């Protein structure tokens, strides 16, 4: 049995901020008996999004797995989120362990702890939860009485910096693999937790997971370093585990229409809507985009399934806003039909639809008009990403300035007053001039808007993020721009915008300083040595590194200086250094399906485009022939798109 900590916790909740976030019992949440399996052992998971409830609850990945697992009568899954420092202090003082929000059970009582990392800045929150949960920080110190700690999500494509703290990592789509893992755990428990030929039962369980080929168990791989500090080799230390661990790809999204019972948060969260993922993957080939590269190929949900999921979600949640989610939603082959048919269905019903991300072309205005038919008109966001045409060619984001101006002209002439443009700073080969072009573009946007609308009150907000090179992308070899130069470049841009008397006041400018990007860079392309830095930061009080009010750059740098002393490498070595073709990258033994030589050729193409010696564009393989990135043959997958030719009928009145 596992006893609830709620009786002790409850007395302290009035003294902490937003206590409702720790209470659980949300609409559509699930609480099961501890021994829920009708026969045989129950397999128990805690799922954690390592951030505060308000960020973690809306996370689709966790919601999907929570449901998929709980649908099985022999599996119990509960959720936990990072607790704020005020509650942490109370928990430490009163000896309350990290608990689940569903039945308030200590997370240390479960068989598995699955963490979903969208960003590396959640690593210190993982360590805090382990410590509060009385689970040894280091995987080697755990026994069969402790949960198996498994990392997933995009950051798990290079889990090396957290290799010492996790027992395993899974790459790719989680729906099927969590069930496969559960079956391995059930069999092992049913057999009386044998040790087999391993030194302990826990090692035997990890071995069983590793030999499936779909679960990476870091301790079964030895890393050796050369004198120059780079990795010399990563080799399995057992014959029965694969040399490379493969990502998992779910091929039939229509067969997995989750979440089917979306959670309705009790406290305010970052998204107050229900989302339906309309397709997974992206093959546009933007060279900076890790999400696009690691989720290939494109797999669409059919218009019929999307319609059914929207209907079901609205009925089960009462949300009045539905987001149609994906990496580039306007690219769905039937997005026009989806928009029109859903707008027809929900005419006069107070249901608004939104596309969180939009491509820069005028078609989006037609879409946006459909989406705003039944509800409020949300802002329009476009992401040209690169400031100059040259830069956009280097990153393979083929948006011309004229495309952008045409699109915003259509928006302003259809009544929009506000357009948001998203850019990155610090892209490979970028100069000050490329970034200053953003000011010129924004001025042209305002001038065009005033002209087509005949009004003066229009605005354009320029939002800029610092570029962080990511594993499994063509830019994985690139040097990251140091944060001082990033900040200086953006200071010049801001001055350029502000100095303009005609347009400057109509242009908003959003940018956070470049320091968190430097830490993200260290964690994204780090190896196992970086684990010591993460641990030192956490021991020094580091938590919630994704929150500017909690993040401390100085703490990270001081920890890195100390933890990396004597290794021959430092933060600059991990971040601002360009890598060569022959270097063994920390994630080379983790197989995203992308062919490393293809990635390298694409990186060289980017450099050739940058210096003008070539003019190559990688097109989208959804609509052009395959260009052999390697994913489909390696993973046994294929592009799966419509059109289906089907339409959504009006809902019948019951
Ligand atoms: S293997 Fe070919 S079709 Fe498949 S994602 Fe890569 S380029 Fe596209």
Image (cartoon, helix red, strand yellow):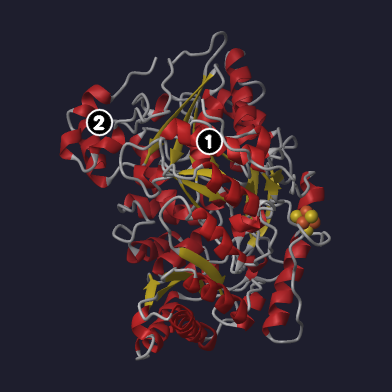
Q: Earlier in the sequence, mark 2 or mark 1?
A: 2
Report crowding for label 1: few under 14, some 14 to 19, many 20 or more residues within 10 A (C-alpha): some
Distance in Å between CA atoms under marks 2 and 1: 45 Å
Q: Quadrant of the N terminus?
A: top left
Return the residue nearer the eye: 629 or 509: 509
Residue 393 figure quarter:
bottom right
Residue in the image at 77% along x and 64% along y: 598
Residue designated by label 2: 95
Instruction: Describe the element under mark 1 as helix, strand or loop.
Output: helix
Residue designated by label 1: 311
Residue 235: horizontal and vertical position, in percent? 70, 48
Return the residue nearer the eye: 609 or 374: 374
Residue in the image at 61% along x and 21% along y: 195
Q: Nearer the viewer, mark 2 or mark 1?
A: 1
The answer to whether 118 is drawn above or below residue 501 in the figure is above
Identify the mark at residue 200; answer none if there is no mark: none
Residue in the image at 60% along x and 46% along y: 341
Instruction: Describe the element under mark 2 as helix, strand or loop.
Output: loop
The answer to whether 383 is drawn above or below residue 243 in the figure is below
Residue in the image at 24% along x and 41% along y: 18
The answer to whether 137 is drawn above or below residue 352 in the figure is above
Q: Quadrant of ligand 1?
A: bottom right
382 lies left or right of 196: left
Return the residue nearer the eye: 197 or 396: 396
Q: From this viewpoint, is residue 328 visible?
A: no
193 lies left or right of 453: right
Q: From this viewpoint, is residue 551 visible?
A: yes
Residue 31: horizontal and vertical position, in percent? 41, 21
Mark 1 beta carbon near ligand 1 (under 8 Å): no
Residue 318: horizontal and vertical position, in percent? 40, 36
Mark 2 beta carbon near ligand 1 (under 8 Å): no
45 lies left or right of 190: left
């Amino acid at each position: 049995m596992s006893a609830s900590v709620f009786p002790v916790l409850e007395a302290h909740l009035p003294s902490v901020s937003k206590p409702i976030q720790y209470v659980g019992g949300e609409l559509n949440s699930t609480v099961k008996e501890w021994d829920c399996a009708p026969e045989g052992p129950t397999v128990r998971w805690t799922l954690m999004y390592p951030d505060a409830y308000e960020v973690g609850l809306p996370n689709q990945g966790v919601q999907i797995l929570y449901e998929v697992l709980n649908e099985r009568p022999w599996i119990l899954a509960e959720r936990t989120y990072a607790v704020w420092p005020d509650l942490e202090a109370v928990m430490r003082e009163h000896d309350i362990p990290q608990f689940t929000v569903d039945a308030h059970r200590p997370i240390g009582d479960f068989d598995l702890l699955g963490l979903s990392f969208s960003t590396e800045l959640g690593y210190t929150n993982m360590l805090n939860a382990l410590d509060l949960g009385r689970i040894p920080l280091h995987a080697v110190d755990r026994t069969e009485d402790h949960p198996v700690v498994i990392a997933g999500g995009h950051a798990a494509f290079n889990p090396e910096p957290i290799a010492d703290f996790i027992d395993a990592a899974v790459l790719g789509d989680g729906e099927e693999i969590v069930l496969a893992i559960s079956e391995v755990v059930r069999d092992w428990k049913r057999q009386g937790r044998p040790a087999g030929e391993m030194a302990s039962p826990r090692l035997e369980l990890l071995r069983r997971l590793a030999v499936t080929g779909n679960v990476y168990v870091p301790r079964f791989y030895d890393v050796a370093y050369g004198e120059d500090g780079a990795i010399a080799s990563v080799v399995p230390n057992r014959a029965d585990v694969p040399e490379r661990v493969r990502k998992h790809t779910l091929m039939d999204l229509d067969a997995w229409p989750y979440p089917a019972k979306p959670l309705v948060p009790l406290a305010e969260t970052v998204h107050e809507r229900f989302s339906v993922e309309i397709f997974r993957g992206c093959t546009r080939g933007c060279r900076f985009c890790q999400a696009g590269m690691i989720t290939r190929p494109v797999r669409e949900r059919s218009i019929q399934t999307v319609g059914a999921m929207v209907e079901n979600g609205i009925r089960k949640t009462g949300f009045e806003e539905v987001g149609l989610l994906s990496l580039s939603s306007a690219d769905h082959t039937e997005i026009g039909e989806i928009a029109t048919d859903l707008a027809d269905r929900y005419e006069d019903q107070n249901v608004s639809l939104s596309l969180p991300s939009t491509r820069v072309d005028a078609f989006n205005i037609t879409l946006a008009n459909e989406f705003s038919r039944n509800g409020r008109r949300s802002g329009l966001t476009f992401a040209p990403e690169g400031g100059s045409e040259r830069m956009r060619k280097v990153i393979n984001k083929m948006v011309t300035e004229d495309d952008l101006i045409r699109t915003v002209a259509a928006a302003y002439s259809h009544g929009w007053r506000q357009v948001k443009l998203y850019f990155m700073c610090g892209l490979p080969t970028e100069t000050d001039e490329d970034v200053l072009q953003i000011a010129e573009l924004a001025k042209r946007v305002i001038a065009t808007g005033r002209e087509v609308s005949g009004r003066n009150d229009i605005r354009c907000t320029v939002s800029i993020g610092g570029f962080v090179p990511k594993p499994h992308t063509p830019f994985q070899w690139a040097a990251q721009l140091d944060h001082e130069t990033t900040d200086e470049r953006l200071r010049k841009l801001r001055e350029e915008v502000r100095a303009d008397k005609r347009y400057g006041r109509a242009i908003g400018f959003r940018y956070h300083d470049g320091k968190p990007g430097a830490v993200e860079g260290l964690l994204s392309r780090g190896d196992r040595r970086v684990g010591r830095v993460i641990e030192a930061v956490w021991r020094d009080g580091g938590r919630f590194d994704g929150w500017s009010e909690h993040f401390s750059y100085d703490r990270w740098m001081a920890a890195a200086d100390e933890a990396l002393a004597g290794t021959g490498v430092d933060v600059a070595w991990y971040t601002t250094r360009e890598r060569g073709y022959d270097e063994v990258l920390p994630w080379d033994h983790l197989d995203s399906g992308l062919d490393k030589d293809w990635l390298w050729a694409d990186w060289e193409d980017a450099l050739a485009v940058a210096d003008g010696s070539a003019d190559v564009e990688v097109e989208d393989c959804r609509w052009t022939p395959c260009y052999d990135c390697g994913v489909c043959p390696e993973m046994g997958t294929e592009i799966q798109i419509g059109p289906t030719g089907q339409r959504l009928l009006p809902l019948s009145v019951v």
